[in-house]
Image: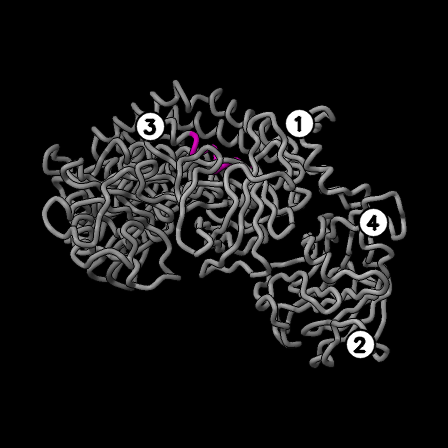
């Protein structure tokens, strides 16, 4: 399926000057994990000078590395300890022939390494230059040893200046302290190799392990992003300062990390981004371009317009690595701006961390969300009315000052009081009058949408909502049946009234769990149901706005017509499949490198429903899901159900169509018995049952209609002889 990008020797010849500059004839292991190491169990602080040459370690225990417990990769097993201290002496015969030096550490959970008493590498613990105490735990608990699962240890490049200053002819010392993440940790790993590039034909050391690859031959046709945090640990917040280099020699030209930068070579601020995805070992990052003084700067990266804020998105649970890219591609074909993105491969602190997407962050900009700038002093008249970017998302981990909540005068069928996060202006910059304005605008918009007169072409919901953008947004969410659709990462923007001040839906964001890539909601996994009616608490409190708009015949007709139009172009099955195939061909061997680094093919990763035994099987599942989804939408788009169905809005029935059972929401003023009656279109009763409810207020019951012939039915709810409400339903099998 994937085209192999094979770079012949004559293609590489153009880069021979770069490679000769490294002067490495071959590679040898100066220190190997399977040698005998001295070690000290970190139940207490080791004596001073433990990491320096000349320290007397005769009282320390000895054993074959790696030393640790719990991963079945330990040649010397030790008890559960907070930390372990390691020493290994080695001889250097001639420093002049050592041109490159790499430290490989298969660690769990954090470590610091020293060469002759000088810190040379660190990961996931403490502050560079400060020796962690014996009982200091690693920062994150997500680091795991890679060799047991077929991966490659983390690689750390030892700078040439460090080699010149600290590596000596004769006896040298490599020392490490490896730390657990907590007292209950189930494992600790410390497997370590020190591998050197040798410039002549001498062979004084050991052969490198079989998994080692000559880094000079690590070419890729994808752009390369190389990040060096200079020993600092990237955390969720705040951003730390690091350096970033981007190499992109253009289509058909290979890229190697030792080449000169093409797009950027400078400072950045970087932090971990995402919510549930932060639990994955492959992290996504937010990046801010900075000057050497720490000020924001901007640059055009990988052919995308100049800006300072970017996202490095890490496909992980989505093993095709295509779901976000496909969605943004289709969204852009619909006409509005969607985040541009480029696939790339990333190295972090000398460690290859796989295939990523460099993406534009959603923000106000002439090349992104092109709305008016809103200054803090614009608090009157037309100036006050735009521009704004807000979103509906999780608010559990932010303060109340970062969002607003609406309480419309008119409510709709058990809908929620929604919360909106300030995106632009940021909550720190937005003026109080601007907060009040956008809150009132959204409140008035929803009240109008909820009202009986919402269909009015002048004073109804169209006065507040840009229906074209809402139709397009809905089509994307329905097409991929996004588990987070209409509730998380749901963006809106509003320009000034003088520039069409209605609320627009979008841009699109976050689709890694769409297209059947989740296992905790059957209706999001399914290809034969609509998502927009599922706004009640049972379904996760989605926005009901699209469900209400579908009660308007004109909007519903626009939805159907737009779908049919798109199916003749970018949403045609052939067009979608061609995009998938072409993207896979472009990714080429980078797919193999990614899954060598992250060996998760054939393994469950939350919240996978399907677990393929190969990359090709993952892609086939995605294609099959999409094919079934578009076919179902083609058949059902003209009969997409209205949520209210009629003027009877006293009960809510879901799901609809019905398979085995359905739920009913309604309100009781007094406890007692209710009757549920289902009739066919001829008026014949096909199901009848009674339920006793002992509480008042909002009620939820479940009804099993039995084995009925698929078709249209009417469900009625009675209290005594009084009809509480009725709904039309479709029974499907």
User: What residue sits right under mark 3 in the picture?
Assistant: 335
Q: Is residue 693 left or right of residue 105?
A: left
Whichever of labels 1 and 4 marks the residue nearer the N terminus, that label is 1
Say if the magenta span includes residue 477.
no
* Label 2 close to label 4 by CB (< 8 Å): no
**Labelled disc at residue 355:** none
Task: Locate residue 670, reporting x and y percent.
Answer: 21, 62
Q: CA distance from mark 1 to mark 3?
A: 33 Å
Q: Nearer the viewer, mark 4 or mark 3?
A: 4
Question: What crowding class fits label 1: few (fewer than 14 Cα within 10 Å), some (14-19), or many (20 or more)?
Answer: some
Are the two marked residues, 4 and 3, in contact with CB atoms closer than 8 angstroms?
no
User: Mark 2 sits on what residue?
Assistant: 55
Q: Which residue is mark 1?
A: 5
Is residue 707 in view?
no
N-term mark: 1 or 3: 1
Q: Earlier in the sequence, mark 3 or mark 2?
A: 2
> Which stretch did the figure color magenta?
319-329
Which residue lies at the image location 34% right of the left edge and 53% below the top edge?
A: 537
Q: Residues within 10 Å of mark 4 (few under 14, many from 20)?
A: many
Query: Left or right of 704: which side holds 646?
Result: left
Q: Which mark is residue 28?
A: 4
Badge 2 element: loop
Task: Pick the quarter of the image with the C terminus.
Answer: top left
State the SS at label 4.
strand
Question: Could you tell whether 679 is left or right of 12 in the image?
Answer: left
> Where residue 202 sits in the image (x, y, percent)?
89, 46
Residue 215: name its quadrant: top right
Q: Quadrant of the N terminus?
A: top right
Q: How far apart are the two marked residues, 1 and 4, measured between alpha carbons?
A: 29 Å
Q: Pick the residue in front: 617 or 499.
A: 499
């Amino acid at each position: 399926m994937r085209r192999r990008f094979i770079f012949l020797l004559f293609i590489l010849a153009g880069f021979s000057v770069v490679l000769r500059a490294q002067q490495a004839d071959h590679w040898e292991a100066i220190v190997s994990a399977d040698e005998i190491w001295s070690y000290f169990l970190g139940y207490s602080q080791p004596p001073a000078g433990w990491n320096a040459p000349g320290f007397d370690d005769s009282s320390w225990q000895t054993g074959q590395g790696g030393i640790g417990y719990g991963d079945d990769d330990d040649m010397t097993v030790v008890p559960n300890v907070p930390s372990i201290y390691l020493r290994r002496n080695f001889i250097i015969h001639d420093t002049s022939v050592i041109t490159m030096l790499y430290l490989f550490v298969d660690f769990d959970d954090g470590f610091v390494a020293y060469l002759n008493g000088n810190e040379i590498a660190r990961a996931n613990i403490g502050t560079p230059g400060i020796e962690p105490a014996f009982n200091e735990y690693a920062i994150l608990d997500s680091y795991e040893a890679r060799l047991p699962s077929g991966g490659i240890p983390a690689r750390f490049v030892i700078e040439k200046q460090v080699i010149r200053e600290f590596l000596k002819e004769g006896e040298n010392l490599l020392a490490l302290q490896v730390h657990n993440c907590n007292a209950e940790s189930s494992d600790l790993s410390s497997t370590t190799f020190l591998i050197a590039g040798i410039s002549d034909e001498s062979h004084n050391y050991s052969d490198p392990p079989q998994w080692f690859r000559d880094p000079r031959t690590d070419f890729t046709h994808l752009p390369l992003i190389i990040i060096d945090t200079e020993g600092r640990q990237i955390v969720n917040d705040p951003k730390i300062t690091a350096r970033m280099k981007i190499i992109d020699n253009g289509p058909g030209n290979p890229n190697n990390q030792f080449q000169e930068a093409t797009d950027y070579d400078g400072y950045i601020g970087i932090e971990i981004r995402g919510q549930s995805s932060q639990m994955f070992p492959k992290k996504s990052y937010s990046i801010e371009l900075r000057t050497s003084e720490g000020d924001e700067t901007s640059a055009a990266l990988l052919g995308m317009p100049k800006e300072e804020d970017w996202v490095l998105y890490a496909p992980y649970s989505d093993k095709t690595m295509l779901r976000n890219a496909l969605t943004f591609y289709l969204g852009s074909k619909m006409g509005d701006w969607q985040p541009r993105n480029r696939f790339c491969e990333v190295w972090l602190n000398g460690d290859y961390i796989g295939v990523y997407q460099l993406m534009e962050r959603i923000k106000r900009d002439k090349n992104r969300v092109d709305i008016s700038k809103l200054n803090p002093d614009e608090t009157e008249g037309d100036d006050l009315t735009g521009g704004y970017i807000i979103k509906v998302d999780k608010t559990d981990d932010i303060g109340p000052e970062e969002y607003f909540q609406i309480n419309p005068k008119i409510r709709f069928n058990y809908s929620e009081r929604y919360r909106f996060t300030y995106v632009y202006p940021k909550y720190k910059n937005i003026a109080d009058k601007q907060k009040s304005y956008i809150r009132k605008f959204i409140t008035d918009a929803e009240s109008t949408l909820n009202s009986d007169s919402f269909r009015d072409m002048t004073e109804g919901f169209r006065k507040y909502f840009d229906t074209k953008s809402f139709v397009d947004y809905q089509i994307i969410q329905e097409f991929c049946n996004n588990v987070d659709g209409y509730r998380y990462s749901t963006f809106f923007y509003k320009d000034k009234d003088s520039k069409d001040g209605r609320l627009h839906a979008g841009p699109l964001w976050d689709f890694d769990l769409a297209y059947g890539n989740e296992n905790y909601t059957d209706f999001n996994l399914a290809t034969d149901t609509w998502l927009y009616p599922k706004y009640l608490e049972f379904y996760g409190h989605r926005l009901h706005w699209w469900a209400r708009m579908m009660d308007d015949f004109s909007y519903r007709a626009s939805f159907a017509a737009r779908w049919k139009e798109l199916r003749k172009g970018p949403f045609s099955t052939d067009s979608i499949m061609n995009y998938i195939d072409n993207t896979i061909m472009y990714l080429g061997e980078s797919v193999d490198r990614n899954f060598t680094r992250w060996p998760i093919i054939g393994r469950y990763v939350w919240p996978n429903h399907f677990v393929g035994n190969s990359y090709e099987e993952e892609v086939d599942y995605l294609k099959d899901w999409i094919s079934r989804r578009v076919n179902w939408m083609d058949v059902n788009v003209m009969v997409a159900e209205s949520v209210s169905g009629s003027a009877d809005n006293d009960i809510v029935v879901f799901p609809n169509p019905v398979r085995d059972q359905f739920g009913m929401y309604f309100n009781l003023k007094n406890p007692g018995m209710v009757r549920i009656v289902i009739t066919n279109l001829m008026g014949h009763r096909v199901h009848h049952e009674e339920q006793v409810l002992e509480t008042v207020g909002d009620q939820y019951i479940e009804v099993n209609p039995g084995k009925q012939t698929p078709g249209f039915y009417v469900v009625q709810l009675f209290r005594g002889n009084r009809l509480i409400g009725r709904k039309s339903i479709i029974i499907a099998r």
